[in-house]
Amino acid sequence: MAKALLGYVGGSDPRVLSEMRRLQQRVQDLESELVRIQAENDALSAAARHGDSLLDSIDVSQAEPALA
């Protein structure tokens, strides 16, 4: 039974092993991309929060019109 399962999962067929390695590499690439995008998203969120605090500090009643 174990041999049957091993053969079903991948066994020694070089095409299946090659495909498995390709898919494992793809998963690793996608995980790396996810980490990079999450870090970029965190940086953008922090910048947006900082930008909001800058906008909050502007006194609109004292602001001058752009065109006079």
Image: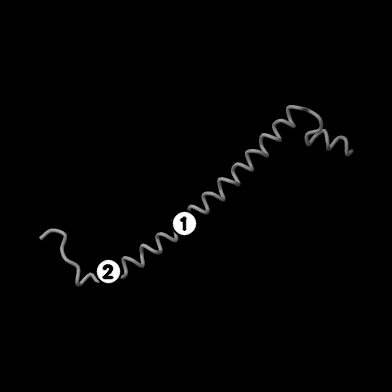
Disc 1 marks which amino acid?
A: Ala
Q: Residue furthest right?
A: 1
Which numbered dot is residue 43?
Answer: 1
Are there few (<14), some (14-19), or many (20+) residues within 10 Å of tag 2? few
Quadrant of the image occupied by residue 45: bottom left
Q: Is residue 29 above or below residue 47?
A: above
Pinpoint residue 59: horizontal percent, then vertical percent: 25, 71
- Residue 66: x, y in percent? 16, 60
Quarter of the image holding residue 21? top right
Which disc is residue 58 wearing? 2
Find the distance from the CA under tag 1 to the CA under tag 2.
Answer: 23 Å
Is label 2 in a helix, a strand or a loop? Answer: loop
Residue placed farthest to the left in the image? 68
Residue lying at 41% horizontally and 59% vertically, measured from the top left: 47
Q: Earlier in the sequence, mark 1 or mark 2?
A: 1
**Dot 1 lies on which element?**
helix
**Identity of the residue drawn at 52% across and 53% down:** 38
Circle number at residue 55: none
